[in-house]
Amino acid sequence: MSELLNAVDALLARPDAMPPPDVRARLRKADGLTQEEVAEVFGVTRVAFHRWETGLAKPRRRHLEAYVRLLTGWAAKHPEAAQASEAERQAG
């Protein structure tokens, strides 16, 4: 059983695992940040960040791990933002 749990932990720890786009935007907004503000931190344009957030593009490797870390931090800080989307999906 521990092998299975280790495999699951490895999947959860994937550096490229991102929540769905609607959750990404909700988490950013819950923290009171604009796309422009986040894009500036990453050194990309607002349009590039918008494409990451909406799922139209995936961050390049050098940004991907940091973006996932940011999303994970926001999810821990604002669990209601991630849960609201899940509740909407179940209701829909």
Image (cartoon, helix red, strand yellow):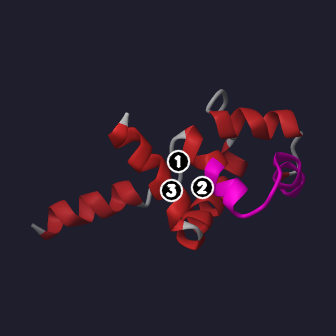
Q: Is residue 83 above or below residue 56?
A: below
Mark 3 residue type: Ala
Q: Residue at x 61, y 62 (%)?
A: 69
On screen, residue 60 versus residue 91, left or right, reads right
* Residue ID for mark 1: 18
Magenta-tinted stretch: 26-41
Magenta-drawn stretch contains 31: yes
Q: Of 15 and 82, which appears nearest the observer?
A: 82
- Distance Cα–Cα, label 2 vs label 3: 14 Å
* Residue ID for mark 2: 68
Mark 2 residue type: Val
Q: Of 25 and 52, which appears nearest the observer?
A: 25
Query: Mark 3 or mark 1, which is nearer the start of the sequence?
Result: 1
Q: Residue at x 9, y 66 (%)?
A: 1
Please rate how many residues cluster around mark 2, counting C-alpha atoms within 10 Å: few if below 14, some from 14 to 19, many from 20.
some
Mark 1 or 3: in front is 3
Residue furthest to the front = 91
SS category of the residue bearing label 3? helix
Q: Position of residue 13 (x, y in %)?
A: 43, 61
Q: Residue at x 43, y 43 (%)?
A: 88
Q: Is residue 78 above or below residue 35?
A: below
- Within the image, what quadrant is residue 29 found in? bottom right
Query: Mark 1 or mark 2, which is nearer the start of the sequence?
Result: 1
SS category of the residue bearing label 2? helix
Q: Are marks 2 and 1 in contact (CB under 8 Å)?
A: yes
Mark 1 residue type: Met
Find residue 82 and name its label: 3
Quadrant including the C terminus: top left
Q: Position of residue 47 (x, y in %)?
A: 84, 33
